[in-house]
């Protein structure tokens, strides 16, 4: 089996900044084998790419690094300080677009990258201009935007908002309750492989208790993609304040939640709300399930 290791990763903003954008970002990854055992004290080769616009967008910066995992299976590095393959990390205009980080890993320390993962960089890793932050929340004096973060509406809580080219609000709403379920009892390839489109993924999922639960909540509800689930984690503050105020089920601070994004026939992605990392696991494992819907 080609993918014999799993990676759990987290990004943190470094203290050093340049022209209102980070000159480097700290990156940590925990590497485990197929039995979920830590891969310790071993050289790991990595190629890191910053993609602009989408999970398959143009690579505006690419670098490689070789690091050694510690006794806990953790590798730590600073993006922006590796061997540059292409681009200039210091000239990335973080406030001008959405960006994704793609990691390719060789757990044996070389350049035969057998593990690949892509996830969206949230506003947490880098400073956004005040005006951008205001438009995301739909705030500002005299705002006529109908939605706001933490709003109790359409059967759930608004946890993410953005505007399209016409200035129209769109966003995501999380359900007020949750359950636990397996992704799929017997692993088969479904084609639910989009990182950003949980609605599409959910329609592709077959023989799935997780999909059955979320769709049972009514029209429009679906299992979030790994990117949509990551956004939920990073917006847990306003979401849980609203859930608590309404006496609804809080988002967990310890559980892992299934996403609708498939990795291979027997494996799908989930997000650990205890550690703040995305990784993948066997589809027949039982984890928490929370539905979302878009507006």
Image (cartoon, rainbow, N blue to C red):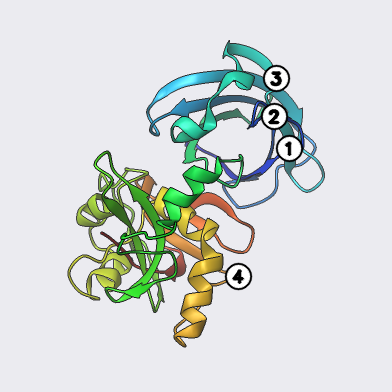
**In the shown orientation, is residue 277 left or right of residue 161?**
right
- For image coordinates 80% across by 37% down, the residue present is 41
Name the mark on residue 253. 4
Residue at x 55% of width, y 45% of height: 130
In the image shown, does 98 or 194 lie closer to the viewer?
Answer: 98
Q: CA distance from mark 1 to mark 3?
A: 15 Å
Q: Nearer the viewer, residue 203 or 33?
A: 203
Q: Which residue is mark 3?
A: 82
Residue 85: give its label: none
Q: Quadrant of the C terminus?
A: bottom left
Q: Earlier in the sequence, mark 4 or mark 3?
A: 3
Task: Estimate how packed mark 3 is, as few (under 14), some (14 to 19) or many (20 or more) residues with alpha carbons within 10 Å.
Answer: some
Which element type, helix, strand or loop, lies under badge 3?
loop
Give the Cα separation between the discs numbered 2 and 1: 6 Å
- Mark drawn on residue 14: 1
Which numbered circle lies on residue 24? 2
Res. 65 image quadrant: top right
Q: Are marks 1 and 3 in contact (CB under 8 Å)?
A: no
């Amino acid at each position: 089996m080609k993918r014999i290791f799993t990676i759990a990763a987290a990004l943190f903003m470094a203290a050093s900044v340049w022209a209102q954008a980070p000159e480097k970002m700290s990156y940590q990854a925990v590497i485990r084998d197929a039995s979920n055992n830590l891969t310790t004290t071993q050289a790991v080769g990595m190629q890191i790419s910053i993609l602009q616009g989408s999970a398959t967008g143009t690579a505006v910066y690419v670098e490689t690094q070789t690091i050694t995992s510690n006794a806990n299976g953790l590798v730590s590095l600073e993006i922006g300080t590796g061997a540059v393959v292409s681009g200039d990390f210091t000239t990335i205009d973080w406030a001008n677009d959405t960006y994704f980080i793609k990691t390719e890993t060789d757990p044996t320390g070389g350049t035969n990258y057998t593990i690949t993962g892509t996830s969206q960089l949230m506003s947490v890793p880098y400073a956004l201009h005040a005006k951008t932050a205001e438009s995301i929340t739909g705030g500002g004096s005299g705002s006529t935007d109908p939605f706001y973060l933490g709003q109790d509406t359409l059967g759930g809580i608004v946890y993410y908002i953005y505007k399209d080219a016409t200035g129209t609000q769109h966003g995501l709403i999380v359900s007020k309750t949750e359950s636990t379920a397996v992704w799929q009892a017997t692993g088969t390839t479904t084609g639910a492989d989009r990182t950003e489109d949980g609605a599409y993924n959910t329609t592709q999922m077959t023989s799935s208790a997780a999909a059955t639960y979320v769709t049972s909540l009514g029209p429009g509800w679906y299992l979030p993609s790994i990117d949509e689930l990551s956004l939920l984690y990073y917006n847990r503050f306003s979401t849980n304040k609203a859930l608590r105020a309404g006496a609804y089920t809080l988002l967990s601070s310890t559980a892992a939640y299934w996403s609708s994004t498939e990795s291979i026939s027997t494996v799908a992605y989930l997000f650990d709300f205890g550690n703040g990392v995305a990784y993948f696991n066997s589809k027949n494992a039982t984890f928490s399930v929370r539905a979302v819907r878009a507006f």
